[in-house]
Image (cartoon, rainbow, N blue to C red):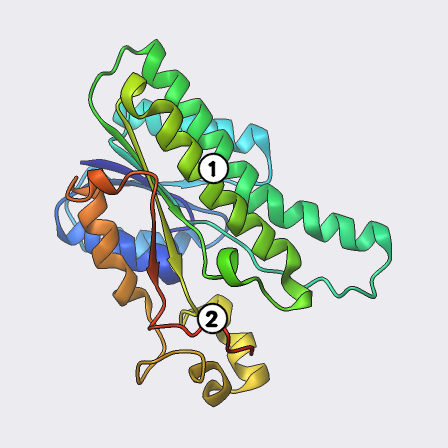
Amino acid sequence: MKVLITGSSRGIGYQIATDLLDQGHDLALHCNKNRSQLEILLRNYESNSFIIQANLSSKIEIKKLIDETCKKFNFPDCIINNAGIAEPSEIKLNLNEWSDLFDKTIDVNLKAPALIIKEFIELKRKKKITSRLRFINISSRAAFRGENQDYISYACSKGGLISLTKTISRSFGKTDNVIAISIAPGFVRTDMAKSFIDEIGEEAVSKGITLDRLTEPKDISPIISLITNGKLDHSSGSTIDINGGSLSLIHI
């Protein structure tokens, strides 16, 4: 399989990349800044995998990402929209500051996946590719239960991503042989989450789950592998929760 993974240089994306490389897939590994991390990873494998650096808040760089992927792969079999940001925006900020932070989050977390999906479906038609194309969108528990007030934009972006997934599945499943599935992790132990854990404490975070430890990237990657390998195609349009038995009524 030829797979494009956005946000693959750390956290969930890095674990997905490692596991898919172990399985022998060829990967287009996207990063924004941490290219060296991926270069180190690829030294351990003999494959046709490669790295693409792009800022997903830029339409020009999104186009570059798509063009480079198709130049090397002709066309991918699976696209994993994993890249995301979570920047706090306190309600006390002035309107312009709050709006800018909101737009930045939406651009990366929702608009970029939508543009990537739109372009690849159009290219699939132009190239007359009839084989199945799979989209895996990494959403969040926040799409269903909301977030605290500093992360309104994050929750909105992840809710939109689930709606996007359902719409793509419904609109292009039969006509274009497209599968789209969302993954909604709960709180995951990643670099992005570290500051939040440090702020409120691991014990407080752990109260929101029913298992004895926080979810880690290694707990999410196996489901991604199943979808990538075509084992869950009849889950198209659905969202798979991976959240350690998260209790939605617990507020942290």
- Three-letter amino acid code at the position of disc 2: Ser
Q: Which of 61 and 151 is in front in this view?
A: 151
Q: Where is residue 117 in the image (x, y as percent from the top left)?
A: 42, 30
- Where disc 1 sits, the SS reads helix
Name the residue rendered at 28%, 54% in the picture: 16
Image quarter (top left, top right, bottom left or bottom right) of the C terminus: bottom right
Q: Which of 215 and 164 is in front in this view?
A: 164
Q: On the image, which quarter does residue 10 sit in? A: bottom left
Q: Where is residue 58 in the image (x, y as percent from the top left)?
A: 60, 35
Q: Position of residue 121 (x, y in %)?
A: 38, 22
From the image, tell me which residue sits under label 1. Answer: 164
Say the numbered circle drawn on residue 248.
2
Label total for image: 2
Q: Which of 11 and 93 is in front in this view?
A: 93
Q: Residues within 10 Å of mark 2 (few under 14, many from 20)?
A: few
Q: Nearer the viewer, mark 1 or mark 2?
A: 2
CA separation in Å, label 1 and label 2: 23 Å
Horizontal side of residue 172 vs 191, given as left or right: left
Image quarter (top left, top right, bottom left or bottom right) of the N terminus: top left
Query: Can residue 137 be seen from the camera position used here?
Result: yes
- Three-letter amino acid code at the position of disc 1: Leu
Q: Which residue lies furthest to the right in this view?
A: 94
Q: Determine whether 209 is above or below 204 in the image.
A: above
Q: Which of 156 and 229 is in front in this view?
A: 156
Name the residue rendered at 66%, 47% in the picture: 104
